[in-house]
């Protein structure tokens, strides 16, 4: 980072010994000006690497400090906890990773949690067949053709950046979606997938070695969210469902997750959504235990990153 390289450059140019090396890196100063020294930087940094010169990484655990020190962060620094972002600020996660900053949880898992479009783009293989991301009307036209060939009638759309069932809509046909999108009522990007009637909704909480599952059900609404009038009851996920959760989390780089599973009347299971966090209403785990387990995962990953 600039603050470090400038300090290093000035220190070495002045032939000082801020790092208590056994001998100065440059026995005498043969450079009359800074420019001549700068030309030798490749050799300088190779020497530093050979001497195993290290600096302590910056560890940030709150969003206020992250905002204040954002431009100071560089390779090896660590940000622990989800990064608080405004809509359309998600590319900042890419910027941090490009600069070598380590994110806990991973940048991909944070992106997937925030954006339904990214989630479906990466995890469509675990979702209902023919799940697609619509970025523009051309994508929607392609979906019309594909759904026509597959005999799909009713469809569901999911808005980006909306949770708790607030961005989920049921349509009689993909043509209705196209009409609304064409008039600007339904702006892309959004996710579209076939509607599967009669599905059971299972919420799985997966934190390290802790796993809990419960079914959510609302007979009067295809959205089974509990705050929409649904009820919950504990259930035991099958080995196949647990395996599905593990594979989804590995693909998305999730160290822990809330996973919503769809189970059709024939017993076929698909991923509905995944998030790093979510409501625990209906779960046995308490809020205090939940936070403690998440923090334990953070500390384990932090220790591993610091030792690397």
Image (cartoon, rainbow, N blue to C red):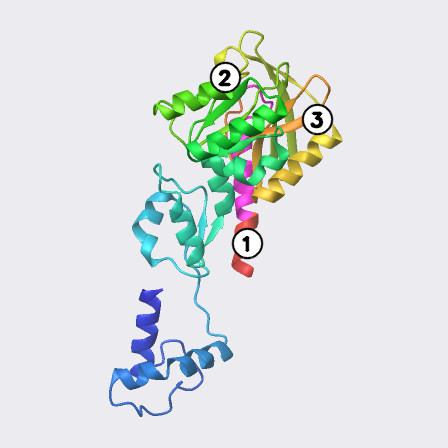
Give the farthest residue toward the top: 220
Picture coordinates of residue 209, whole percent (x, y): 66, 38
The circle drawn on residue 107 is none
Determine the CA span between mark 1 and mark 2.
45 Å
Is residue 288 a member of the stretch shown in magenta? yes
Q: Could you tell me how far apart the alpha carbons at marks 1 and 3 are, in whole angstroms?
A: 32 Å
- Residue 261 coordinates in the image, percent (x, y): 62, 26
Q: Dot 2: few (<14), some (14–19), or many (≥20) neighbours within 10 Å? A: some
Magenta region, mostly helix, strand or loop? helix
**Labels 1 and 2: the sequence-earlier one:** 2
Q: Quadrant of residue 245?
A: top right
**Mark 3 lies on residue:** 237
Q: Nearer the viewer, residue 34 or 193?
A: 193
Which residue carries the number 1 mark? Answer: 303
Depicted 223 relative to depicted 70: above or below: above
Q: Is residue 165 visible?
A: no
Residue 243 against residue 12 in the figure, above or below: above
Q: How far apart are the alpha carbons under marks 3 and 2?
A: 27 Å
What residue appears at the point 55 percent right and 17 percent down from the top-left corner?
Answer: 154
Mark 2 lies on a secondary structure that is strand
Mark 1 touches mark 3? (CB < 8 Å): no
**Looking at the image, is mark 3 or mark 2 earlier in the sequence?**
2
Quadrant in the picture for the C terminus: bottom right
């Amino acid at each position: 980072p600039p603050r470090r390289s400038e300090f290093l450059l000035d220190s070495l140019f002045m032939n000082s010994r801020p790092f208590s090396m056994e001998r100065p890196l440059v026995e005498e100063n043969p450079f009359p000006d800074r420019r001549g020294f700068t030309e030798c930087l490749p050799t300088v940094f190779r020497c530093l690497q050979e001497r195993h010169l290290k600096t302590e990484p910056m560890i940030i655990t709150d969003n206020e400090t992250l905002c204040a020190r954002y431009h100071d962060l560089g390779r090896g620094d660590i940000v622990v906890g989800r990064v608080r972002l405004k809509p359309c600020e998600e590319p900042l996660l890419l910027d941090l990773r490009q600069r070598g900053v380590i994110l806990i949880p991973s940048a991909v898992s944070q992106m997937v949690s925030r954006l339904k479009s990214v989630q479906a783009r990466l995890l469509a293989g675990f979702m209902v067949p023919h799940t697609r991301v619509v970025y523009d009307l051309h994508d929607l036209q392609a979906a019309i053709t594909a759904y026509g060939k597959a005999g799909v009638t009713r469809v569901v759309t999911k808005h980006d950046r909306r949770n708790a069932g607030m961005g989920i809509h049921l349509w009689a046909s993909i043509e209705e979606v196209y009409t609304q999108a064409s008039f600007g009522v339904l702006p892309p990007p959004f996710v579209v997938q076939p509607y599967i009637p009669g599905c059971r909704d299972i919420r799985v909480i997966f934190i390290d070695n802790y796993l809990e599952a419960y079914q959510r059900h609302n007979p009067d609404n295809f959205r089974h969210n509990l705050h929409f009038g649904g009820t919950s009851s504990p259930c035991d996920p099958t080995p196949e469902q647990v395996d599905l959760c593990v594979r989804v989390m590995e693909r998305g780089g999730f160290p822990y997750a809330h996973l919503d599973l769809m189970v059709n009347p024939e017993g076929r299971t698909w991923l509905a959504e995944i998030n790093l966090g979510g409501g625990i209403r209906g779960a046995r785990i308490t809020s205090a235990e939940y936070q403690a387990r998440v923090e334990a995962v953070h500390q384990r990953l932090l220790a591993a990153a610091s030792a690397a």
